[in-house]
Structures are given as structure tokens and as C-alpha cells.
Image: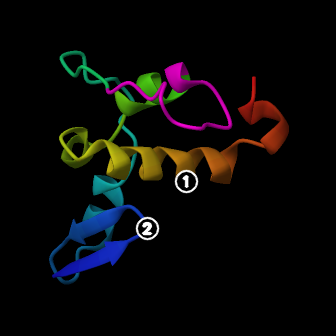
Amino acid sequence: TEYTSRYGKISFEAGSSSKSKEMSRLMLNPAKNHKPETYEDLQLDGSSLLLSSLEMHLPRHLLRAPRDQKFTYMRDILHDYVPPALRSR
């Protein structure tokens, strides 16, 4: 089954909700061989370096996704967990 969330299309098998949740979690350890995109050209609330660093922790299925999809995923995470006052630091 496939559905579209705010992070893009996600595929999962019926009855495997924990599997789909696991697929969308950030990785604890960064992908060492991944070269992150640059986000310096975007209007950001915070540092473009933060996004480049966070990108290395994206779920494996997102590492090769288009830059705009990765940006949207990371922006949503930051907006959910980082207070506005801290985003500009």
C-alpha cells in the first residue's frame, strides 16, 4: 500500500504500521558516505549548515530523494521540535 504524507509517498504492507514508522525515523548514526545538499540559496529560519548536518541522519529512503522533498521533511521536523527563538541560532 502507498500513501502520501507531508513527507512524500511512503510504501508499506498492510498490518505493518511499525515498519512504516521505522522507515520515517531519523537515523541515530549519520550516513558517512552521503554528501549532503547545500541549502544556502534558500530563505531559512535557521542555518543552512544545520540542514546539511541533519540531512546525513535522514532515513535511507530519503537520502536519494530530491532536495525539495528532503528540505520539507527536515523543515517539518525542526518546526515541530525547535522553538522559534532557537531556530535562528
Please indicate whether residue 40 sits to the left or right of residue 82 in the image.
Answer: left
What is the crowding at mark 2: few (fewer than 14 residues within 10 Å), some, or many (at least 20)? few
Whether residue 46 is situated above or below residue 20 in the rendered picture: above
Q: Residue at x 55, y 53 (%)?
A: 76
Task: Tell me the amino acid under the disc marked 2.
Answer: Arg
- At x 31%, y 42%, the residue is 67
Q: Main secondary structure of the magenta part?
A: loop
Residue appearing at x 44%, y 51% in the figure: 73
Q: Which mark is residue 6?
A: 2
* Disc sitting over residue 13 in the figure: none
Q: Earlier in the sequence, mark 2 or mark 1?
A: 2
- Within 10 Å of the Cα at label 1, are there few (<14), some (14-19), or many (20+) other Cα atoms? few
| Highlighted magenta segment, given as a residue range | 37-49
> Label 1's element?
helix
Q: Residue at x 36, y 48 (%)?
A: 68
Outermost residue, top direction?
Answer: 32
Residue designated by label 1: 76
Image coords of residue 1 (percent x, y) = 15, 82
Q: CA distance from mark 2 to mark 1?
A: 8 Å
